[in-house]
Image: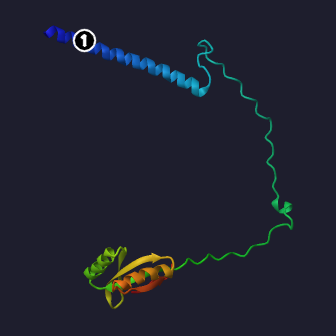
Amino acid sequence: MAKPASRSAKRGGSSIFTGVLIGLTVGAVLAVAVAIWVTGSIPFRNGGEPKQPTAAPAAPAAPEPAPSFDFYKVLPGGAPEELPSAEPAAAPPIYYLQAGAFQNPADADNLKAQLALLGIEAVIQTSEVADKGVFHRVRVGPFDAPEDAERTRTLLAENAISATLVKQLPTQQETP
């Protein structure tokens, strides 16, 4: 019984080798077919002889001079007048709702959690105020327009949370 098992092992090994050879052959044929299809030319047309390089066209003896663009002569009225420098537009203010300012960070976290239960995202800003110590501000926003802030403020008022509208200019530093 040992002999039939060894015979089947030899047959299995040769069938794998045969399958690999067939796969490589089919792959090579497909690669050549795709190359012919993509390039549109048959690489074996010259009978194995390498192609002779074609001569490049001769370069012109002298380069052509670059065209001269005289815009100020072409424009009606000659050279343009100096335009006044435009001052940069002031950035629009940003609005926040301040729901509270606490010295105890746990109180600020509690208010932030209450706002989260209402579906309102808030942030806690920590800042030091001169002669008063560290404050933790609970703010909602930013809002682009005060009308947007008022809608949220109404929702807060309905849930017994008072909020103050804070307007922040881009260059202005605010206080609590």
Q: Amino acid at mark 1?
A: Lys
Q: Quadrant of the N terminus?
A: top left
Tell me residue 103's x, y (percent).
29, 85
Using residue 46 as the reference point, say whether residue 78 is left or right of it.
right
Tell me residue 25's x, y (percent).
44, 17
Tell me residue 160's x, y (percent).
33, 86
Q: Is residue 137 visible?
A: yes
Where residue 8 sits, quadrant-wise, is top left
Up/down of 71 relative to 32, above or below: below
- Name, please, the residue furthest toward the left: 1
Q: Residue at x 74, y 73 (%)?
A: 83
Residue designated by label 1:
10
Q: Does dot 1 land on a helix, a strand or a loop?
A: helix
Q: Nearer the viewer, residue 134 or 11?
A: 11
Q: Residues within 10 Å of mark 1 (few under 14, many from 20)?
A: few
Using residue 43 as the reference point, say whether residue 1 is left or right of it.
left
Where residue 127 sits, quadrant-wise, is bottom left
- Name, please, the residue furthest toward the bottom: 131
- Name, please, the residue furthest toward the front: 158
Q: Quadrant of the C terminus?
A: bottom left
Q: Nearer the viewer, residue 147 or 47?
A: 147
Up/down of 22 relative to 116, above or below: above
Q: Is residue 97 visible?
A: no
Q: Residue at x 49, y 22 (%)?
A: 30
Up/down of 98 relative to 14, above or below: below
Q: Residue at x 80, y 35 (%)?
A: 61
Q: Residue at x 81, y 60 (%)?
A: 71
Task: Say how the picture is coloured.
Answer: rainbow
